[in-house]
């Protein structure tokens, strides 16, 4: 359903999750800068854990690589021990993951995802909104209902699609399992999500939105996703901890754009 002529710059995110000590983080950041700075045809976003965000900001400054946070609170400040707000992140990051299934599993509700998106946008951050069904929901044939609900809850109250928002389709059953969705299934789900955005915000707005695939993406399987017309890059977990693997993924995505 992609209109001819629609060009969306693909974006590859590296979600490090709760991994790497400070030394390993710095080594990876420098390795990524060395390998990926200046790569055309793809936007690269590195999302380290909170304590290493300011290292990432400093070590990637002046390069084409972007820094993202993995989560945010919805309030700008206040008595929320252990939390980090969007205005705080703004000093060190440009992007922020919102609604990741690992956050939803930890109790984040659809309403909270919505508040986090609003807080991120208000602070000038670009949210990467993750949606995806669990295995039992997939088996019950409820995938599209789940995606519809998650998209609508996350974007509740928006009358126009904020152009800063990126979506990531991440089936929960594919995350960290090695059981990646086939490129055809991932493409079909991204088309479905794009259709939901078109219903809400119109076809032109939906066509402009970048939708990543995430879930057991590797240097070996990325080409299949990169070849799909409605998949605009990837959100990578495990393979983003290896400079060579993540570089190969970014290059494969950039090659399709070229
Ligand atoms: P894996 O690539 O390790 O499956 O993780 C995907 C993910 O959750 C990215 O946000």
Image (cartoon, rainbow, N blue to C red):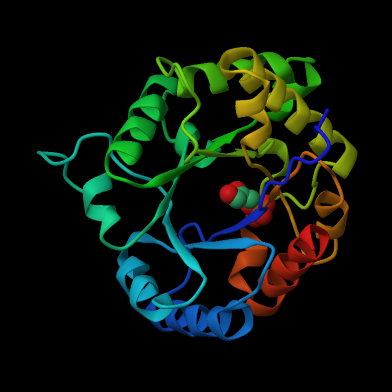
Q: Toward which corner of the image does residue 201 lie, by quadrant? A: top right
Q: Is residue 241 visible?
A: yes
From what the image shows, is residue 40 above or below residue 111? below
Q: Is residue 107 above or below residue 145?
A: below
105 lies above or below 42: above
Left/right placement of residue 4 relative to residue 160 reads right
The residue located at (67%, 13%) in the rendering is 145
Residue found farthest to the front: 5
Q: Residue furthest left?
A: 79
Residue sitting nearer the eye, 10 or 245: 10
Quarter containing the C terminus: bottom right
Quadrant housing residue 239 = bottom right
Q: Viewer-proximal residue, 174 or 155?
A: 155
Q: Is residue 33 left or right of residue 252?
A: left
Lateral position of residue 27 relative to residue 146, left or right: left
Most foreground residue, 132 or 9: 9
Horizontal and vertical percent position of residue 107? 41, 29
Percent across and percent down for residue 137 are 71, 20
Residue 42 locus on image (x, y percent):
66, 62
């Amino acid at each position: 359903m992609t209109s001819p002529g629609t060009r969306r710059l693909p974006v590859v995110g590296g979600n490090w999750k709760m991994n790497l000590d400070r030394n390993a983080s710095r080594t990876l950041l420098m390795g990524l800068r060395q390998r990926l700075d200046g790569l055309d045809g793809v936007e690269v976003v590195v999302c380290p854990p909170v304590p290493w965000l300011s290292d990432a900001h400093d070590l990637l400054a002046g390069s084409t690589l972007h820094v993202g946070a993995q989560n945010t609170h919805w309030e700008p400040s206040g008595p929320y021990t252990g939390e980090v707000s969007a205005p705080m992140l703004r000093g060190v990051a440009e992007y922020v993951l919102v609604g990741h299934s690992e956050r939803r599993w930890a109790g984040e509700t659809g309403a909270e995802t919505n508040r986090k998106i609003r807080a991120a946008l208000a602070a000038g951050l670009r949210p990467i909104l993750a949606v995806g069904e669990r295995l039992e929901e997939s088996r019950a044939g409820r995938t599209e209902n789940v995606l519809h609900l998650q998209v609508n809850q996350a974007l509740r109250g928006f009358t126009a699609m904020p152009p800063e928002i990126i979506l990531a389709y991440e089936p929960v059953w594919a995350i960290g399992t090695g059981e990646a969705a086939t490129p055809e299934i991932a493409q079909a789900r991204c088309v479905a999500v794009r259709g939901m955005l078109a219903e809400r915000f119109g076809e032109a707005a939906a066509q402009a939105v970048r939708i990543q695939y995430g879930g057991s993406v590797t240097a070996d399987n990325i080409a299949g996703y990169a070849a799909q017309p409605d998949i605009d890059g990837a959100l990578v977990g495990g393979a983003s901890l290896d400079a060579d693997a993540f570089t190969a993924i970014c290059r494969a995505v950039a090659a399709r754009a070229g």
